[in-house]
Amino acid sequence: MLLKEIKNIFHKELDHQFGKSEVAHFFYYFVEHYLGLPRFHLAIHPQWIITKEEESHFFKGLAELKNGVPVQYILGSTTFMDLRFMVNEHVLIPRPETEELVQWVIEDHKSSKKMLNVLDIGTGSGCIAIALAKYLPSVHVTALDVSKEALAVARYNAKVNKVNMECLEADVRTLEIGEDAYDIIISNPPYVLEKEKPKMQDHVKNAEPALALFVPDLQPLMYYEYIAKVAKKGLRKGGGLYLEINEQFGKEVSKLLRSHNLMNIEVRQDLHGKDRFIKSEVYQKSDLQGNL
Ligand SMILES: C[S@@+](CC[C@H](N)C(=O)[O-])C[C@H]1O[C@@H](n2cnc3c(N)ncnc32)[C@H](O)[C@@H]1O
């Protein structure tokens, strides 16, 4: 079959569901992944023929896309900070916004000469932890998640990306953290409200793990509350807490952090101009002991 015929079938079958440009992206991801060819290949070789076996990958993928499976799960991987990560239904697909949070940490610590102890809470695929281990000069990274299945993916990704990382299966709500154990604590916790579900894309709300996405409508900040407690005790004096947040709650999370005596709070917007990240720091630890 001609490759361009497959492309036409993709558009005929999927454009109404995803839009023309998204479908073109899907098709080219498949070309790269299953044929090992660059995305412009078809433009140079319009009469390119593929084998029956190659065809079968495209048709299987097409059926999965129709059923709302995200393309990253179909291909089994995605990229984050120019690194490749295995993903499956147990982990959130790493998002481009989260790269901005990681960039912030790197920017703040790239010239650090000392060994930095880093804790990533809710590591999922391990994307944040592994990117920091890869790009910061001297770090010891601990990746924590309550999901055993997610940690298996994170472990695999650490190995493939050749970084050393400690994996910790734990629930942040009951975490016993050592005092002053970390220089950096980072987290992209679940922060989507249950009531936001109706406006979410089907392939996100139906395919990605609910454990990674949702918080109860009445407790939108529950993870930030637990993380703030962990940070207050676990961060060294001068240590930084970096968080991704729901765009609606920049002010509320700032207030919550302040109430835990975290200082120097800075809210940053993502590339779409939405409040998405917060950094805060721990100072004067000795003055805080009474509040632990
Ligand atoms: C939004 S995902 C973030 C995944 C990854 N860090 C990223 O940025 O792509 C949140 C993660 O928190 C984990 N999680 C949910 N509840 C948790 C809990 N109580 N304790 C620890 N981790 C939890 C989920 O399993 C999920 O991997």
Image: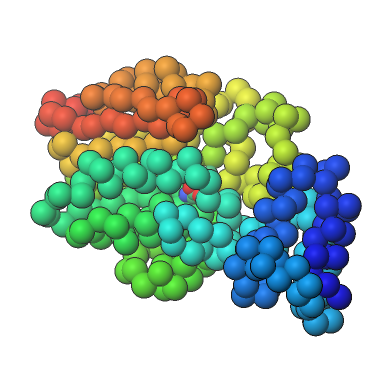
Residue closest to the eye, 152 or 55: 55
Percent coordinates x, y for residue 59 in the rendering:
84, 67
Residue closest to the eye, 5 or 173: 5
235 to the left or right of 16: left
Percent coordinates x, y for residue 98 in the rendering:
45, 43
Percent coordinates x, y for residue 181 in the rendering:
22, 49
> What residue do we see at 48% from left, 25% from top?
273
Residue closest to the eye, 202 or 52: 52
Residue closest to the eye, 114 or 149: 114
> What residue do we see at 60% from left, 23% from top?
218
**Quadrant (top left, top right, bottom left, bottom right) of the N terminus:** bottom right
248 to the left or right of 167: right
Which colouring convention does the figure follow? rainbow
> What residue do we see at 40% from left, 63% from top?
167
Residue 67, visible in the rendered structure? no
Q: How many marks?
A: 0
167 to the left or right of 151: left
Q: Quadrant of residue 264?
A: top left
**Quadrant (top left, top right, bottom left, bottom right) of the C terminus:** top left
Percent coordinates x, y for residue 243 in the rendering:
39, 36
Q: Quadrant of residue 104?
A: top left
Residue 11, visible in the rendered structure? yes
> What residue do we see at 78% from left, 56% from top?
65
